[in-house]
Amino acid sequence: MNEMTIIIQLRRTAKIWSLISLGFVAVFLVGNALNSSEPLPTLVEWGELALFPTGVLTGMLLAWKYEWIGALLSILSLGAFYVLEWNLKGRIPHGPFFLLLTVPAFLFLACHICSVLRKKREG
């Protein structure tokens, strides 16, 4: 398998995984919205929601056209979300789920880096 094929497969995997992440989060948001007994988020929770899932998913969708910018937005949003959680609660979220939902951003970033390196080698 040549390098271009690997980049194409990596990009395809990132796009499919980003759609799965978007769908997964959408199911949770719709389910939460349908539960009328849930109180509205606090100001801090709105900040967290702006970072994850909004910032992460927006970055992933942006990465479909602008890999570098979208991937960076997603990764920085996730990092800021973890920092906010650490500062507010003294811990980062438990479990791998936030990171797993953000994996496409890392794949988009890897794809961009591989593409740039390939272009530099080819002249």
Image (cartoon, grey):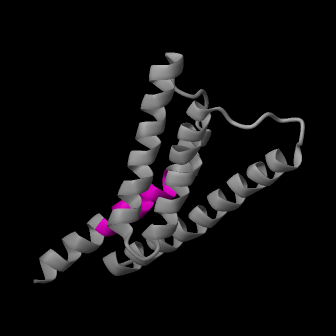
Please say whether residue 55 is one of the residues in the magenta stretch.
no
**Residue 110 sits inside the magenta stretch:** yes
Which residue does the image show at 38% across and 47% down from the upper left? Answer: 76
Q: In the displayed structure, does residue 19 sit left or right of residue 12?
A: right
Say whether residue 16 is left or right of residue 81: right
Residue 26: where, in percent of width, then height?
A: 72, 57
Q: Residue at x 46, y 43 (%)?
A: 78
Residue drawn at the location 50% of the way across and 45% of the way down: 51
Left or right: 7 with respect to 47?
A: left
Between 31 and 38, the residue placed more toward the observer is: 38
Magenta residues (range): 103-112
Looking at the rendered image, the quarter that the N terminus falls into is: bottom left
What percent of the width, then of the height, locates residue 106? 42, 55
Q: Is residue 110 above or below residue 87?
A: below
Pick the front one: 11 or 53: 53
What residue is rendered at 28% in x and 73% in y?
115
Relative side of 91 to 7, left or right = right
Quadrant position of the C terminus in the picture: bottom left
Q: Quadrant of residue 79?
A: top left
Q: In x, y percent, where is residue 4?
A: 34, 80
Q: Main secondary structure of the magenta part?
A: helix
Q: How many marks?
A: 0
Image location (x, y in percent) of residue 14: 51, 65
User: Is 67 located above or below residue 91 in the figure?
Assistant: below
Please, which residue is most extreme toward the left here?
123
